[in-house]
Structure formats: C-alpha cells, structure tokens
Image (spheres, rainbow, N blue to C red):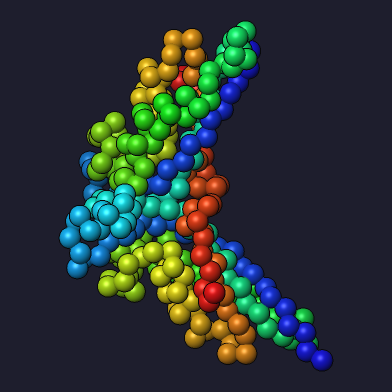
Amino acid sequence: MSTRVAVYRKEHFNAAHRLYRPDWDEAANARVFGKCALPNYHGHNYELIVKVTGEIDLSTGYVIDMKVLSDLIQREIIERFDHRNLNLDVKEFAALNPTAENIAVVIHDLLRPHVSAQMDLQIRLYETPRNFVEYPA
Amino acid sequence: MVYLTRLEHFNAAHRLFNPDWTEEQNEAVFGKCANANWHGHNFELFVTIKGNPDAQTGFIFDAKKLGAIIRERIVDKVDHRNLNMDVEFMRGKLCSIENFVMAIWKELEPALPSNVQLHCLKLTETPRIYVEYYGE
C-alpha cells in the first residue's frame, strides 16, 4: 500500500514591486491600490513555502529529495526574483499585476513542469508576516 | 528604571548605491543590493524608551501615544515608499540600515516629550538582519 506524505521547503527572497494597472488612470489606481500604487515602488521580504505531496519512494524513503527541491526553487524562482523589481525585472509580470495572488500562481507555474505529475504542488507565499496566499486553493 | 518598547512596521523599496562609484564598484561591494530597479523589505522598528513610571498613571509614557508619534514622524514618511527617492531625511545618504536607523533617531528624538528618554532603536531589515542604535 502506498503512503502519501506532504513535504515542505521554505525559501525567501526580497523584492520591490508596485500594484498598478497601466490601463487605469492615476486616480483609479490610487483608489483601488492605495499606497501600494505609489510610483517609486516599495518592497517586501517574501517567504515562500513549497509543498509537494506524493508517495514515499520505497528505495529512498523520500517523497522528493529536499536538496533537489531546494535547487529547483533557487534556480527557477530565487535567482530570478531575489533583489529584483518584480514589475521591471521579471518578465512574467510585464503585463501582470504582481499581487501576492499572481506571484503565487506564477511561482506555481514555473515549478510545475519540473515536479513529477504524480505529485501535487502547492505554493504558500507570505508578502508580510500578516498577509499570505495559497495556490492552488 | 524601566524600559518600554513599541514595535511599528513598514514596507519600503531601496537600493545600496554609492553615486561616487562606477557601476562595477557598486556591484563589487553591494552585489545584488545595488540593482538599479530597487528591491525591498518588510522593516520592523522597535523603539525603546526608559524612565520611571509616573505615580498617577503607572506609565513611563503612554504606549499608544508613543505609537502615534512613531507613525507620524517615521512610518507615514517611509511606508510603501522608496527610501532613496521619496524620504527627505534620507536624501544624500547611502540607504544602509545603519544610516537609516541613525537618521530615524534624529527624526524621532526631538518629537518625544522632555520627560521621555529614547534608549534604543532596533531596526530589522529581514528576519535575519537587524541593527541596534543607542544614539552614541
């Protein structure tokens, strides 16, 4: 009988962003996004928790090798997001508002092709210690 | 003597960059912190005052009033701002947390009542990096 277990890897990155829709005027952006829309950006310490759920491999005892998972997150996410401006430096947000919700979806979609289809993948992203999102919900 | 600490928080963008240096020198010293398009942090500011509790109130100073002063003097000026571009009291200064905490002290200390003594500012840039300043 197979045993499904969830394993988690925690990583972090620091980035600047602003919440802003170029197709809205300044007043509409200010009304909806408040000070998050300020033109010179602000930033956060993002905490990222990647959850992988799958069956324990009988030969290794692992669901997934944590080192492999960590290297994957470093390569696909941290190296591209850390100490960057999400709006200006990360191409996925060239036309997508970098809300915590959208960042979580982007991170999921960047990692998904590299994690076995037999495993479930869930992203929890903390934008501040008090604001966090999960995807898939 | 009792020490009272009030914690406030804010989010801001910044960049470590010395305008007198070339891009290469900045890159060599500050690494990815020098990124021209900024990066950012969730900052936490711990403000510690010291004194003897007032006989009538039991307070050194009303913590709620202390919070209001910190928000008016500091948080309202830096929250969701770019420290290099938007903050008057950081103009011309390199935006390290060392310089930032010293500048915050200069802004905050004169705003406190004369019977309140500012003891320490602790400023966290990440959960793993913080500075403390005692006004020395």
| Quarter of image, res B90 | top left
Q: Is residue B51 left or right of residue B108?
A: right
Q: Is residue A101 left or right of residue B129?
A: left
A111 lies above or below B113:
below
Q: What residue lies at 57% left-to-right and 79% top-to-bottom?
A: A121
Q: What residue lies at 47% left-to-right and 24% top-to-bottom?
A: B65
Q: What residue lies at 62% left-to-right and 90% top-to-bottom?
A: A118
Give coordinates of residue B114: x percent, y percent. Answer: 44, 10
Q: Residue furthest top?
A: B55
Q: Is residue B107 left or right of residue A29?
A: right
From this viewpoint, is residue A9 visible? yes
Foreground of the two, A127 or A23: A23
Give coordinates of residue B86: x percent, y percent. Answer: 25, 41
Give coordinates of residue B5: x percent, y percent. Answer: 56, 27
A128 lies above or below A94:
above
Give coordinates of residue B87: x percent, y percent. Answer: 28, 37
How many numbered discs sit on the rendered protein? 0
Foreground of the two, A109 or A23: A23
From this viewpoint, is residue A12 visible? no
Foreground of the two, A75 or B85: B85
A82 lies above or below A122:
above
Q: What residue lies at 43% left-to-right and 53% top-to-bottom?
A: A44
Quarter of the figure that contains the N terminus of chain B: top right
B4 lies above or below B34:
above
Q: Residue furthest left?
A: A25
Q: Residue furthest right?
A: A1
| Quarter of image, res A57 | bottom right
